[in-house]
Amino acid sequence: MLNPLTRPRGAFTLIELLVVIAIIALLIGILLPALAGARAVGRQCVEMSKANQLMVAFGLYADDNAGRVLPGYPTNEMVRGENAPYDMNGDRIGGSAAAEEIAKRYPWRIAPYLEYNFQGLYDYPIDFSLPDIHYRISLYPTLGINASFVGGNSRDLAFDARVQQIYGRFFAKTLSEVRDPTSLITFTSARGMNEGETAIEGLDPRQQGYFLVRSPLMYAHNGRQWQDQYEPYAEDVGINSGYVSLRHRGKAVVAMFDGHVRTMDWAELNDMRNWCDLATSADWSLLPR
């Protein structure tokens, strides 16, 4: 009879141990992509929720202004005096060229309709004690506005009477005039470069957000405004994709004029019928009347 003290103990052999390690490694390899995909879906859902909130505020602005939509990027004159937006402390944002530039960007003008809940516009914490808070809030919201064709963009001379005489009014000014509100991009995932004169201390240099986006085409004589292929790390995101970001597995979150939110890929975003209510083809651009 064997002595209990010398009886062989059950233990894993080296082969068994290696097999177990291999199985664990295989399971991790299977699970990690699934977890990464779940996180990506979660980020997309959060941004879509932000877009929904933004469109509610967009609609409330129009309700308060006899159906007129929020100007996409107004002129200096349009944000002066009594028309200047207010900050969360009730102070007007204006009085200088720099302040008027801040006031022209949509976040401060739509802020009252979000009850100044800026966390619904940004992916990073907002520190309201910072001295440059007006500037910070104005520049890098998660979603950019299609200012050229929704509300009008002063950078395109949209409010210039001579330009309107030549091209007509090509941007949506009221809720009721849009023929197909289900197909008109109002806000979309944006990206800017937190560098140079627009750098904000403490933010990632490639902060994903910007206050406006530009369509792939605009005036016919200017040609295409975007490059042919999307580059996630383009040096000039304005030239590459008009500040649009395809950060959701090759797609952007878009909020349409009727209020519904969806995603679009590069091909859909290159279709001008999604950018301008007047567009009749994917490669449409503005021509003199």
Image (spheres, helix red, strand yellow):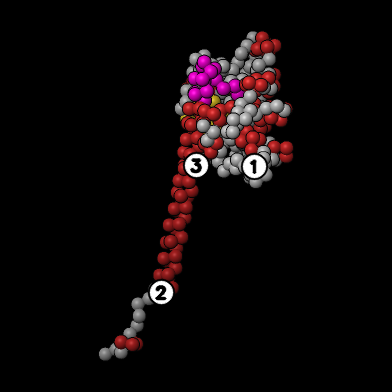
Amino acid type, mark 3: Arg
Q: Which marked residue is nearer to the observer: mark 3 or mark 1?
A: 1
From mark 3 to mark 1, how far is it between C-alphas?
A: 27 Å
Compared across the picture, whether 53 is left or right of 4 comes to right
Instruction: For label 3, count other residues whose C-alpha is less than 10 Å away and answer few (under 14), some (14-19) or many (20+).
Output: some
x then y, percent, for residue 271: 56, 25
Given contact means CB atoms under 8 Å apart, are the residues at marks 2 and 3 in contact?
A: no
x then y, percent, for residue 63: 49, 20
What residue do we see at 33% from left, 87% from top? 5
Amino acid type, mark 1: Leu
As rendered, which of 119 and 285 lies closer to the eye? 119
For the record, the magenta segment spans 58-75
Lower position in the chain sequence, tag 3 or tag 1: 3
Q: Which marked residue is nearer to the observer: mark 1 or mark 2?
A: 1
Residue on which the image places disc 2: 13
Secondary structure of the residue carrying tag 2 is loop
Q: Is the residue 1 above or below the residue 211 in the image?
A: below
As rendered, which of 279 and 152 lies closer to the eye? 152
Q: Quadrant of residue 150?
A: top right
x then y, percent, for residue 206: 64, 42
Q: Which mark is residue 130?
A: 1
Q: Which marked residue is nearer to the observer: mark 2 or mark 3?
A: 3
Given contact means CB atoms under 8 Å apart, are the residues at marks 3 and 1 in contact?
A: no
Residue on which the image places disc 3: 43
From mark 1 to mark 2, how far is it between C-alphas?
A: 62 Å
